[in-house]
């Protein structure tokens, strides 16, 4: 299938309907907060992804953190959603960027997917929807077994397991902690610059598992991965490794 034959608008519609697989708990957490900005962010990122999918020269990650962070920070400033209740100073782009970076880290947005991997998934969606006689977006939203069927067509237990392990490792407490610290530093800098208040104490609550709670979530995530593998490829599931391991920042 020649990617140039697929209309850009159709690719965007499919990307918006085909959200990354994630365990239910993380999906629920990601929906907390302001839904307006996430709707805009996902729309902008789908356009970026579509352009990269249609570009034969593009390789590597389909979506990079820097682009997503810039899009979200700009939207947050435009929509005014980063001006938190009780915040005594005006939100600047540096603060918005730190907020966006933290929110993206704990969201369901997938920064580990390659352009090649997404193209394979896109072809599977188009093939499956044609087989079932449904438009791609209707197939994704109305057919109960769509996700499992698509996964079976374009991936394997080894690839799916490795991909999901990489995703959860990118939410390691060290990584999330650095994002929180960067936001705390941005708040302090603006308090000093705008209010002449130095050494301001900043408390940030993110409602996301860190510390020991992260490892419980990681084990639960990987159990969900194995359950999904068992559904898609019966007999291919395996035990979950919960050993604490270090991870590098993305």
Image (cartoon, grey):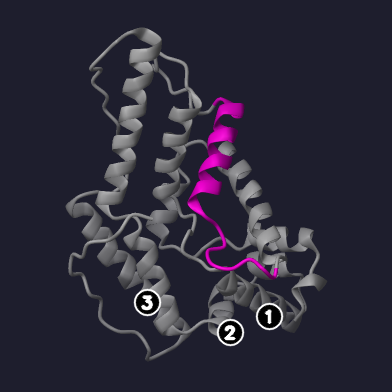
Against 69, residue 215 (above or below) is: below
Q: Which is nearer the N-term, disc 3 or disc 1?
A: 1
Q: Main secondary structure of the magenta part?
A: helix
Label drawn at residue 128: 1
| Callout 1: SS | helix
Q: Which is nearer the N-term, disc 2 or disc 1?
A: 1
Span shown in magenta: 56-80
Residue 194 position in % (x across, y down): 40, 11
The quadrant the C terminus occupies is bottom left
- Residue lying at 58% horizontally and 84% vertically, measured from the top left: 153
Asked if the residue at tag 2 contacts the one at tag 3, i.e. Cβ–Cβ closer than 8 Å, the answer is no
Residue 71 position in % (x across, y down): 58, 41
Task: Determine the CA span between mark 2 and mark 1.
Answer: 9 Å
- Residue lying at 44% horizontally and 23% vertically, measured from the top left: 84
**Would you say residue 30 sits in the magenta stretch?**
no
Task: Find disc 3 in the rendering and name its residue.
Answer: 227
The extreme front residue here reads 57
- Residue lying at 22% horizontally and 62% vertically, measured from the top left: 246
């Amino acid at each position: 299938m020649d990617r140039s034959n697929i209309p850009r608008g159709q690719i965007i519609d499919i990307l918006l309907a085909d959200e990354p697989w994630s365990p239910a708990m993380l999906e629920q957490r990601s929906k907390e907060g302001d839904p307006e900005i996430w709707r805009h962010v996902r729309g902008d990122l789908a356009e970026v992804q579509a352009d990269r999918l249609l570009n034969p020269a593009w390789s590597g990650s389909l979506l990079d953190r820097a682009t997503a962070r810039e899009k979200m920070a700009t939207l947050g400033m435009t929509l005014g959603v980063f001006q938190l209740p009780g915040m005594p100073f005006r939100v600047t782009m540096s603060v918005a960027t730190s907020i966006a970076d933290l929110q993206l880290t704990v969201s369901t947005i997938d920064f580990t997917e390659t352009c090649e991997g997404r193209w394979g998934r896109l072809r599977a969606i188009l093939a499956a929807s044609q087989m079932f006689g449904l438009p791609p977006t209707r197939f994704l939203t109305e057919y109960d077994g769509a996700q499992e069927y698509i996964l079976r067509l374009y991936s394997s237990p080894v690839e799916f397991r490795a991909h999901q392990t990489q995703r959860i490792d990118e939410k390691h407490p060290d990584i999330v902690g650095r994002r929180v610290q960067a936001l705390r530093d941005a708040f302090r800098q603006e308090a000093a610059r705008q209010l002449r208040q130095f050494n301001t104490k900043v408390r940030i609550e993110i409602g996301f598992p860190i510390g020991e709670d992260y490892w419980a979530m990681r084990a639960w995530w990987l159990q969900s991965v194995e359950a999904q593998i068992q559904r898609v490829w019966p007999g291919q599931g395996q035990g979950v490794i919960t050993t604490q391991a270090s991870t590098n920042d993305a």
